[in-house]
Amino acid sequence: QVQLQESGPGLVKPSETLSLTCTVSGDSINRYYWSWIRQPPGKALEWIGFIYYSGNTYYNPSLKSRVTISKDTSKNQFSLKLKSVTAADTAIYYCARDKGGQNWFDTWGQGTLVTVSS
Amino acid sequence: SYELTQPPSVSVSPGQTASILCSGDKLGEKYASWYQQKPGQSPVLIIYQNTKRPSGIPERFSGSKSGRTATLTISVTQTMDEADYYCQSWDGSTAIFGGGTKLTVL
């Protein structure tokens, strides 16, 4: 059974870089598409971007200038970096799997809350 | 930018049928998916490719699509179905989520 687990600092200072990692068990990140999705407290879900089996990436145009998604095949992990954060980036960050690309997110991590504050 | 529009809230009595609509200009060309999210939990996929249910999702959840509107229907609604529901589709290579609908069962 595939499981995804997010990890990283829960508090980031304004203007700094948010860094999170998603560890995948029960599947290989060399297959499928792996996304980051966030949810500000009390608000809707927002897709950040994905990396897929080839290592290629695609980002939400609204965040593209600040986002980098990468993967470490040896650890079966993929990571998110979001630079120049502000309070508006405070959210629960989820990683999720899409088996087909432009399909649906069938498996989600438990999410991790990241607060941007000095 | 492309948007998916959902009603902010829907109320239903236990045992009745609830319908949640999701509208978007490009839904006619793309599949819709639906997710259920209970407080403090991650979203769970309940409908994909407009009408299909993943294994383990109760039959009372069904989906349909007509033109630019997708519909999630919950028949014989139970109190455990009280949650936020999100539709999702794609605009090119960008995943789009609706604003979410809070389903209240009372």
Image (cartoon, coloured by chain):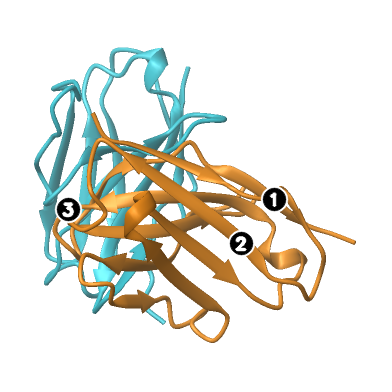
Chain colours: A orange, B cyan
Earlier-in-chain disc, 3 versus 2: 2
Q: Secondary structure at mark 1?
A: loop
Residue A100 drawn at (x, y percent) = 14, 58
Q: Chain of mark 2?
A: A
B22 or A46: nearer the viewer: A46
Q: Quote the CA–CA distance across marks 3 and 2.
A: 24 Å
At x 15% / y 41%, what residue is drawn? B63
B53 or A36: nearer the viewer: A36
Dots 3 and 1 on the same chain? yes
Residue B3 drawn at (x, y percent) = 38, 71
**In the shown orientation, is residue B66 left or right of residue B96?**
left
Residue B105 drawn at (x, y percent) = 44, 21
Q: Quote the CA–CA distance across marks 3 and 1.
A: 28 Å
At x 11% / y 72%, what residue is drawn? B29
Three-letter code, disc 3: Lys
A57 or B84: nearer the viewer: A57
The picture quadrant where one finds residue B27 is bottom left
B7 or B60: nearer the viewer: B60
User: Which residue was labeled with disc 1?
Assistant: A9
**In the shown orientation, is residue A88 left or right of residue A58?**
right
Q: Determine whether label 1 and label 2 are within 8 Å by CB.
A: yes
Give the number of the mark in front: 3 or 1. 1
User: Which residue was labeled with disc 2?
Assistant: A19
Earlier-in-chain disc, 3 versus 1: 1
Q: Which mark is residue A99?
A: 3
Three-letter code, disc 1: Pro
